[in-house]
Image (cartoon, helix red, strand yellow):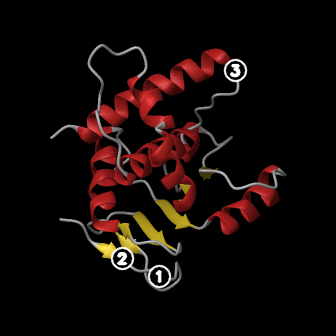
């Protein structure tokens, strides 16, 4: 079942996931299948052992994410996903008690990525049998949530070896989420 949700205010109408500490909020001008995304987030967080971790995911427009990108990364352009980890630099014993962080995702950029198959091709790279033949906005948003969550957990792709590890995790987690 796909639940089309109109834009809501983060302060007043976040979608909580089965009374879990993960929340979703659509601040974009586009309908987003919030309940379907919530199911995928729930499945992902159970798989990675973070079911009780607080994470906020906000869907927004290009202008809003561009503003965040400029403020936090000094890049004056829209981007697909930004992560704001809250456990970075903390002692591992303390870190697990802290919120995982926040993820901001641009819906218009995600829609462009669906059209050009950028992430679909990356997931299917070097595969005889592709993970997925089609790529929907749901798949793209799932991928971006996975990518953002990896950053919140301390993974990066600045160096080739880091990128290799992160790409393997993206694929593994995507496969798990897409399993029936």
Residue farthest to the left, as pictured: 180
Image location (x, y in percent) of residue 28? 53, 72
The CA distance from mark 3 to mark 2 is 38 Å
Location of the N terminus by quadrant is bottom left
Using residue 139 as the reference point, say whether residue 105 is left or right of it: right
The CA distance from mark 3 to mark 1 is 38 Å
The CA distance from mark 2 to mark 1 is 8 Å
Image location (x, y in percent) of residue 10? 52, 78
Residue 3 appears in view: yes
Residue situated in front as seen by the camera: 30 or 115: 115
Q: What's the residue at 53%, 51% (across, down)?
A: 112
Residue picked out by circle 2: 5
Q: What's the residue at 48%, 86% (across, down)?
A: 12
Can you tell which quarter of the image residue 64 is in? bottom right
- Mark 2 Cα within 10 Å, few/some/many (few <14, many 20+)? some
Residue picked out by circle 3: 159
Residue situated in front as seen by the camera: 159 or 50: 159
């Amino acid at each position: 079942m796909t639940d089309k949700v109109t834009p809501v205010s983060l302060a007043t109408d976040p979608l909580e996931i089965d009374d879990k500490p993960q929340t979703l909020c659509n601040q974009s001008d586009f309908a987003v299948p919030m309940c379907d995304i919530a199911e995928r987030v729930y499945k992902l967080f159970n798989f990675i052992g973070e079911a009780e971790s607080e994470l906020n995911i906000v869907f927004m427009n290009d202008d809003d994410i561009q503003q965040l990108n400029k403020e936090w990364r000094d890049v004056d352009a829209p981007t697909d996903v930004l992560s704001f980890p809250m456990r970075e630099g903390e002692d591992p014993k303390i870190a697990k008690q802290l919120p995982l962080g926040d993820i901001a995702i641009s819906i218009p950029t995600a829609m462009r990525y669906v059209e050009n198959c950028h992430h679909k091709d990356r997931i299917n790279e070097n595969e005889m049998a592709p993970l997925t033949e089609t790529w929907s906005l749901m798949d793209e948003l799932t991928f971006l949530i996975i990518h953002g969550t990896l950053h919140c957990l301390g993974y990066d792709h600045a160096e080739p070896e880091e990128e290799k590890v992160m790409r393997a995790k993206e694929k593994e987690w995507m496969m798990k989420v897409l399993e029936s």
